[in-house]
Amino acid sequence: MPESPAPALRVVDGGLSVLRLYDVAYGIDIARVEALAAGASRPRLVRTEPKAMTYGVESVELALGQVALPGDTMVPEADVRVRLYDFGAASFRLTVTLSDTTWDDFLAAALAADRATKPAVAAPFWAELRDRLRTLVEPALVRPSDSGLEEDYLIAVVRSTQPVLSADALLERVDPIPFLSGGETLPLSDAARADLLRHRFSYYRDDLALLTWDRALLVEPRGDPDVAHVLEVANAQLLEQRYYDELLDDELPRMYTRASRVRGNLAPSTLRRYGRLARELRTLVAEVTELTERVDNALKVTEDVYLARIYAAALELFRVKAWGHAVDRKLAIIRDTYQALFDEAAAARAELLEATIVLLIVVEIVLAFIL
């Protein structure tokens, strides 16, 4: 007799997290947030020893309660929490629990929630959440901003399945590509499939992390949130590097225009503008350098090799270092410009002083002949 087909894989306990990150301020006073918001807490890792991770300043997390997801989804409600970082980023996390469902329905629900929360269809939804956050913690926001810049990430987490499978057996049983590709319906080439599966990690036989640019599939039988935590931090770092890259992109043309206006004029008022412009540029460089260093130091994995590999892969996937190098290059241009302005101002003052001295000598000589 032919073998009967294996029963469909079921997700006994799972969930998904929709992340949306915004730059909301120049900085956030984390201690002030804890004083303002009841129930604020510092996120803690579960599996990883505290000494294995170092933070510049630990983030703080707030619970915003249950919300109805926009649009027509298989999961109408989600729990909302927001994590605040001292360098000005706010990471909203919508979490949905999915239990006792088939694998296909589990991934379909994740994709439906992802589509329903995209900015193109859910901009008012996210704007309302940002307004709620500002109402709670506005006094803790240093120079609040609303740049409109955002990052998004989708994390699907499977905590238990029926039957129980190892990571290798799970991938033989089901195809994660439809989820990792964002719901692509046409068959992908072998190269495209290999690229989507390239960032695969396992520590135990039964856990699994598959990372792509905008989503991750995690199998965590022990329910550890550690991998999801480092992915969220990496997204926050990406957001801030992009923010400062755009800030400097806007500043460079203005800098060139203002510098060209003051060059070649020895009037005292122009020389004062030289110095004022140079000081403003120096202040900008100092502020951006300070903030980017805080972003770089947001998280350092020191002893947990598994998390370190995942964190490094996420930074590579998100091209965080490439964005950081772009910011550094633009900062170098501004540094060179303000140094050139200082040098030109000093040279112009010296020329003006020399001309004044020569004029005084000529006046003295003329007066001597007249008198």
Image (cartoon, rainbow, N blue to C red):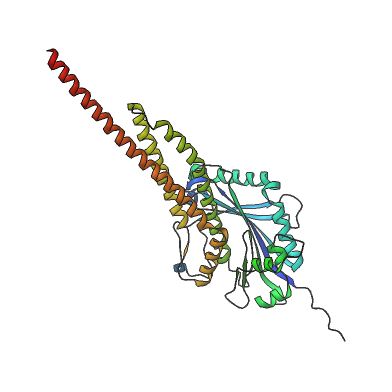
Residue 116 position, x and y percent, is 72, 52
Residue 235 position, x and y percent, is 56, 56
Number of numbered labels in the structure image: 0
Residue 301 position, x and y percent, is 47, 66
| Res. 134 visible in picture | yes
Q: Residue at x 68, y 55 (%)?
A: 78
* 125 w.r.t. 297: above or below: above
Q: Is residue 49 left or right of residue 172?
A: left
Q: Residue at x 34, y 39 (%)?
A: 342
| Res. 41 visible in picture | no
Report the quarter where the N terminus lies: bottom right
Q: Nearer the viewer, residue 229 or 371?
A: 371
Q: Residue furthest right?
A: 1
Q: Nearer the viewer, residue 123 or 248?
A: 248
Q: Nearer the viewer, residue 268 or 301?
A: 268
Q: Residue furthest bottom?
A: 1
* 239 w.r.t. 312: above or below: above
Residue 92 position, x and y percent, is 60, 53
Report the quarter where the C terminus lies: top left
Q: Residue at x 79, y 76 (%)?
A: 7
Q: Residue at x 19, y 21 (%)?
A: 362
Q: Residue furthest top?
A: 371
Q: What is the quadrant of residue 127 in the picture?
A: top right
Q: Nearer the viewer, residue 282 or 154?
A: 282
Q: Is residue 310 left or right of residue 266?
A: right
* 269 w.r.t. 125: above or below: above
